[in-house]
Image (cartoon, rainbow, N blue to C red):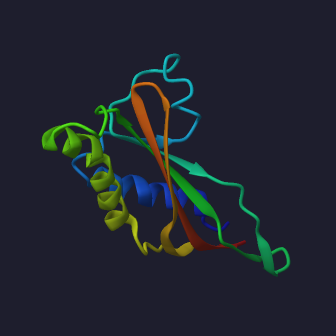
């Protein structure tokens, strides 16, 4: 049986992000930010990996497939306050963007047996979670499945 793209991609992301000193938790996405009060607490900064729906196209019917899936990284940090303070407060508030750059450096152009060209496609910032900030970094790659 062929190797699973999602399994291999998740393991690659987890391994590379655990190599970053700042990242304290990596897990699969399960609407973690929306239910933060109901879940076990997790250390922050945390990264949750979400696989968007994957549309596979057959290269060889029943045997080989290709896709360009999106993988969404939900990077969750504590809100450091407004970005209109003195230089120290401003730097702390905007420090999350440095973390996003570190994550990008760790993941850019990764490849494995089931994917290649793993790279950043879109970035979103969401502050609808009271004391948390959620940045969603969307990566895309070329994935293949062989049976």
Residue 18 drawn at (x, y percent)? 31, 50
Q: Residue at x 49, y 28 (%)?
A: 129
Of all residues, the one furthest to the bottom in this rendering is: 59
Q: Is residue 1 visible?
A: yes
User: For the image shown, how many numbered marks are present on the structure?
Assistant: 0
The reply to whether residue 114 is visible in this rendering is: no
Identity of the residue furthest to the right in this view: 61
Q: Nearer the viewer, residue 66 or 75?
A: 75
Residue at the spot 74% in from the left edge and 75% down from the top edge: 65
Where's residue 112, x and y in %? 48, 73
Residue 58, placed above or below residue 37: below
Quarter placement of the C terminus: bottom right
Locate residue 49 relative to residue 86 in the image: left or right: right
Q: Is residue 108 left or right of residue 93?
A: right
Q: Quadrant of the N terminus?
A: bottom right
Q: Quadrant of residue 63?
A: bottom right
18 above or below 44?
below
Percent coordinates x, y for residue 53 in the rendering? 71, 55
Q: Position of residue 31 (x, y in %)?
A: 58, 34
Q: Is residue 49 above or below residue 147?
A: above
Q: Nearer the viewer, residue 141 or 121?
A: 121
Residue at 32% in and 61% down:
101
Q: Quadrant of residue 19?
A: bottom left
Give me the residue at 43% from left, 57% from top.
13
Residue at the top extreme, as displayed: 38
């Amino acid at each position: 049986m062929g190797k699973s793209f999602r399994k291999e991609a998740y393991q690659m992301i987890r391994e590379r992000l655990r190599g970053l000193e700042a990242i304290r938790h990596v897990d699969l996405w399960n609407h973690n930010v929306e239910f933060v009060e109901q879940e076990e607490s997790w250390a922050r900064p945390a990264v949750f990996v979400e696989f968007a729906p994957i549309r596979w196209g057959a290269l060889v019917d029943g045997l080989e497939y290709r896709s360009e899936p999106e993988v969404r990284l939900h990077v969750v940090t504590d809100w450091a306050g407004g970005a209109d303070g003195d230089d120290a407060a401003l730097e702390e508030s905007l420090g999350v963007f440095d973390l996003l750059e570190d994550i990008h450096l760790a993941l850019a152009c990764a490849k494995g047996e089931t994917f290649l060209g793993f790279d950043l496609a879109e970035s979103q910032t969401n502050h609808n979670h009271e004391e948390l900030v959620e940045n969603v970094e969307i990566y895309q790659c070329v994935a293949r499945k062989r049976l």
